[in-house]
Image (spheres, helix red, strand yellow):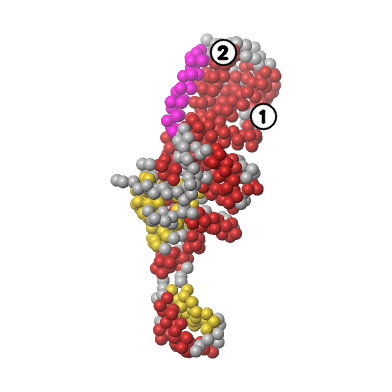
């Protein structure tokens, strides 16, 4: 990883009539890293990906992919990227193998390479048995994997994934995550959109939180969690009888101690690891027996709630204005 | 401004040689024909349906229709072939909308390929689709007594006119396909346009019996000129009567003219609608 920018969004704007789907978004994705574009339905994530992959022309602003300008060098941009769209865009009537043959021919790849790469990709994505079946007989997870195989056929250095795991069952989802991590370890740059906080937390080096077409926060998952609120130290006692004394001890070094008697648990606001080690030292000398002591950070769900005032995943069908923008 | 080259491929990249428009279009045609092979029912519209039309008109309505010149079956076949050709624009439109809807066009647009290949490929495969219909129609015709009576050159010329007309109407299909959002909407719209276009004409009945105003509309309908041209070139009927409108007096030239005019009108509309649809 040499940190050169693989993807840059430069003040991208896209209006659909009166709707400002994307309203001035900039970010940089260093080569070999993973950027997660996180936001609810209709936030403008898909539109951003469509502009960066040259599918959609920005109203203003521009971007660079592999150093090529998306407006002035679209062909070079297209040669450098792979795209897996929101709806798996495989051809359902064609077999898995024919789908790769089709795309291979459109890239102008040598036939021999396409044949070999097809075998390799199908083995990797566990599609060998289904290679000669029409894609319409595939399950949702298989379709996604075929879509990904198609996107990887020309071994692009940069891969865009638009909600790659939406609609997948948990098992298929973790399978896809494993594949994506493998690609990153080989040096591929990923830009992925997701409404799943867990997914962004899991895969992304950098997260850009988008809401209503604007960037409302950016940083590493840890930075974002720090931003959302302080961490807290959680102590679980072995004996309930020690609760009052423990609360007093904790209160001496941290504000706002919260006691849960039933679970013998004490929670206190903490600035970070420093507070935790201080509390650990206090208990060490006090002789109070502990079951557990740890630092709890706010989840990305908390982050999103904190940033936008609404939950990320509850938006789906409730807001009709979101529908048109996302597609 | 300097462009930084950062394409450090993670794994060895294969040589990418973006295909020419011709090669890309050929690939699209291959894919579209594969669809037809997998789903032969896609051909029902130009095969079983058209044969039914032939039989229905030839044997159910035919007896009650006084055709000029010889036999009604001779009169009918050119008309029904033109109708089949007109419907190819609906086939194009539905195919294109389907590709736009299902994301195939998006996938295609993310590749280093001339974007017009989708349209060229779609047009060629639709012409092939319709030509299969024309062939089925010709065979059915031969079985029930239709013949090409004016020799090889005129016979081929008539088929060429049909293809030219089909090509012109394909632009209408691309235009409609680019504007509409769902296959169902395309189907509804195209059939609403296609039926009057192919029935208010000389395709199935002579125009002489129509009220004067309707007769004028019918005889200026491009469908009538091309039908008349095929009838004359194949020797399936006499030239139009002296009271027929001017297009029917010069059907071959007018057919070519109509095809060029329709292309000139719809091709720019189609290309700009497709471009606009492709920008978002």
Mark 2, residues whose alpha carbon is within 10 Å: few (<14), some, or many (≥20)?
some
Q: Is residue B134 visible?
A: yes
- Would you say residue B259 sits in the magenta stretch? yes
**Magenta span:** B246-271
Q: Quadrant of residue B58?
A: top right
Going from the N terminus, do you reach mark 2 or mark 1 first? 1
Mark 1, residues whose alpha carbon is within 10 Å: few (<14), some, or many (≥20)?
some
Instruction: Return the chain for callout 2.
Output: B
Residue matched to label 2: B154
Q: Looking at this rendering, what residue extends furthest in the front direction?
A: B12
Q: Quadrant of residue B200?
A: top right
Q: Taken as a whole, is the magenta stretch helix, strand or loop? A: helix
Kindly identify the residue that appears in the image at 39 percent across and 49 percent down.
Answer: B6
Does residue A49 lie above or below A203 as drawn?
above
The disc at residue A88 is none
Kindly identify the residue that appears in the image at 65 percent across and 28 percent down.
Answer: B47
Residue matched to label 1: B48
């Amino acid at each position: 990883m040499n940190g050169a920018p693989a993807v840059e969004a430069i003040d991208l704007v896209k209006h659909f009539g009166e709707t400002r789907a994307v309203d001035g978004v900039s970010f940089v994705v260093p080569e070999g890293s993973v950027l997660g574009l996180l936001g609810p339905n209709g936030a403008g994530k898909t539109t951003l990906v469509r502009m960066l992959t040259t599918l959609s022309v920005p109203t203003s602003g521009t971007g660079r992919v592999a150093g090529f300008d998306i407006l002035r060098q679209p062909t070079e941009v297209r040669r450098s990227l792979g795209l897996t769209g929101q709806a798996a865009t495989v051809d359902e009537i064609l077999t898995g193998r024919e789908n790769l043959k089709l795309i291979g021919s459109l890239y102008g790849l040598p036939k021999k390479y396409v044949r070999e790469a097809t075998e390799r990709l199908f083995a990797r994505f566990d599609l060998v048995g289904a290679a000669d079946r029409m894609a319409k007989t595939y399950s949702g997870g298989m379709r996604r994997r075929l879509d990904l195989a198609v996107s990887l056929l020309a071994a692009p250095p940069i891969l865009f994934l638009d909600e790659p795991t939406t609609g997948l069952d948990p098992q298929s989802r973790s399978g896809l995550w494993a594949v994506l991590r493998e690609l990153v370890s080989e040096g591929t740059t990923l830009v992925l959109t997701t409404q799943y906080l867990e997914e962004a937390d899991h895969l992304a080096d950098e997260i850009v939180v988008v809401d209503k077409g604007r960037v409302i926060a950016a940083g590493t998952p840890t930075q974002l969690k720090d931003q959302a609120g302080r961490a807290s130290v959680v102590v679980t006692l072995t004996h309930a009888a020690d609760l009052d004394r423990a609360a007093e001890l904790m209160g001496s070094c941290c504000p706002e101690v919260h006691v849960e008697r039933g679970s013998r648990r004490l929670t206190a606001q903490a600035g970070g690891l420093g507070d935790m080690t201080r509390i650990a030292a206090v208990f060490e000398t006090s002789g109070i027996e502990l079951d557990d002591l740890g630092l709890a950070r706010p989840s990305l769900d908390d982050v999103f709630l904190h940033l936008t005032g609404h939950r990320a995943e509850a938006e789906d069908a409730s807001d009709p204005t979101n529908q048109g923008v996302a597609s | 401004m300097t462009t930084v080259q950062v394409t450090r491929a993670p794994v060895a990249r294969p040589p990418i040689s973006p295909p020419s428009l011709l090669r890309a279009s050929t690939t699209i045609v291959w894919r579209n024909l594969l669809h037809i092979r997998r789903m032969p029912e896609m051909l029902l519209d130009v095969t079983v349906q058209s044969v039914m039309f032939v039989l229905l008109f030839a044997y159910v309505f035919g007896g009650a229709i006084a055709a000029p010149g010889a036999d009604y079956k001779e009169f009918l076949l050119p008309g029904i072939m033109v109708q089949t050709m007109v419907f190819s624009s609906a086939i194009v439109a539905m195919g294109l909308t389907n590709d736009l809807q299902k994301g195939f066009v998006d996938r295609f647009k993310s590749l280093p390929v001339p974007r017009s290949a989708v349209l060229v490929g779609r047009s060629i495969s639709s012409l092939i689709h319709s030509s299969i219909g024309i062939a089925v129609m010709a065979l059915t015709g031969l079985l029930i007594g239709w013949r090409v009576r004016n020799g090889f050159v005129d016979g081929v010329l008539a088929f060429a006119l049909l293809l030219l007309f089909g090509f012109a109407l394909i632009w209408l299909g691309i235009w409609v396909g680019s504007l509409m959002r769902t296959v169902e909407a395309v189907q509804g719209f195209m059939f609403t346009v296609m039926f009057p276009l192919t029935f208010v004409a000389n395709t199935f009945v002579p125009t002489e019996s129509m009220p004067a105003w309707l007769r004028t509309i019918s005889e200026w309908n491009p469908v009538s000129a091309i039908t008349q041209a095929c009838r004359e070139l194949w020797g399936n009927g006499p030239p139009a009567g002296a009271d027929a409108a001017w297009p029917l007096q010069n059907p071959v030239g007018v057919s070519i003219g109509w095809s060029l005019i329709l292309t000139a009108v719809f091709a720019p509309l189609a290309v700009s609608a497709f471009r606009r649809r492709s920008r978002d």
